[in-house]
Amino acid sequence: MKKRSAHKEHSQMHEKLSKWSLFWRYPIIWMIVGAISIILVDAFIRPLAEQQVPGLLSLLLTLTLGFLAIIVYMLTMKYLARRSIPELSKKGAGFEAVMGALTGVIFIALSTIIIVSLGGYSFQWANGADTVTVLIASIEAALGAAIVEELIFRGLMFQTMNKLLGNWAALAVTSLFFGIAHLGNTGATLWSAFAITLEAGVLLGAAFLWRRNLWFVMGLHFSWNTLEGLLGIPVSGHTTTGLLIVKVKGPYLLTGGDFGLEGSVVPVIISLLIAIPMLYGAVHNRNLPTNFT
């Protein structure tokens, strides 16, 4: 009798552990846990980096933030989601990041040139601006945002939605939430949120579907924000001190107003022209899986 009772208790304990393990492996759960953990790391370190500390120390803190956020993401995927992490593979990471960064530079440069040619922007040098200080500040702000936001949106949320609903629903959901997340920014409107949904949500999501690589998407996001900052253009409503001073003229739909370049219809069109070939490549490239494991 005692042996039967002990066996029964052991079976019940094993069943409870199995249910608990399944609970943590459910996609919505590990997405929420991972996102909250990354946000907490960001909330703890970012204020330290934004304080009046020497530029290089501030950049070092931002690099630390990025490193810890990536570690949290990897631990979440390994121990909660119980899946491999090919999207953060070390192999080819540098190449992917550089290619993503070049894509971002082309996107922002082309969008800016078109707006300038249409009379929306004009630039002049910011006399007295310290080049090194401005460069470090732009890199620091862009780097933290690129790593944290991409780990949460294209990493955790995209793959959760992909697991539950498939690729296209994942692209739609993450794009929509990315736009909504920017509604609280300075100068934000329903139009700017819609624009962010298309030009950032769809473009970055398409890039991830195409490359299946977070390094590429982080590089794209990073160079996008860095170049805007150096040009003195507000980054999604966040004013920056750049190497140039931008003078804005013309209608909101052309210039984006106080929200900056992302509020303009020009980058919306350019981003879709870039995203569509990426989506085509994601569908037709047989070397890339159509679903995550």
Image: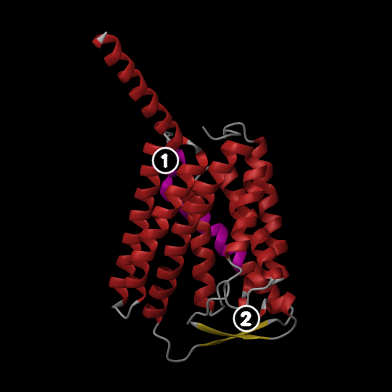
State the image coordinates of residue 25 (x, y, percent, origin top left).
Answer: 45, 35
* Residue designated by label 1: 77
- Report the front residue among 156 and 286: 156
Q: Earlier in the sequence, mark 1 or mark 2?
A: 1
Which residue lies under the disc numbered 2? 258
The foreground one among 105 and 3 is: 3
Along the line of sight, the residue nearer the viewer: 281 or 34: 34
CA gap between label 1 and label 2 equals 38 Å
Region rendered in magenta: 85-108
Q: State the predominant SS element of the stretch in magenta.
A: helix
Disc 1 crowd, CA 10 A, few/some/many (<14, 14-19, 20+): many
Q: Residue 98 appears at what percent x and percent y? A: 47, 55
Mark 2 neighbour class, 10 Å CA radius: few under 14, some 14 to 19, many 20 or more: some
Residue occupying the far top of the picture: 1
User: Residue at image x 66%, y 49%?
Assistant: 172
In the picture shown, does residue 292 fall above or below 42?
Answer: above
Indicate the amino acid at tag 1.
Met
Q: Amino acid at mark 2?
A: Asp
Q: Residue at x 36, y 72 (%)?
A: 47
SS type, badge 2: helix
Q: Which mark is residue 145?
A: none
Side of 19 relative to 200 (left or right): left
Q: Position of residue 53 (x, y in %)?
A: 29, 78
Q: Is residue 120 magenta?
A: no
Can you say whether 99 is above or below 179 in the image? above
The image quadrant of residue 115 is bottom right
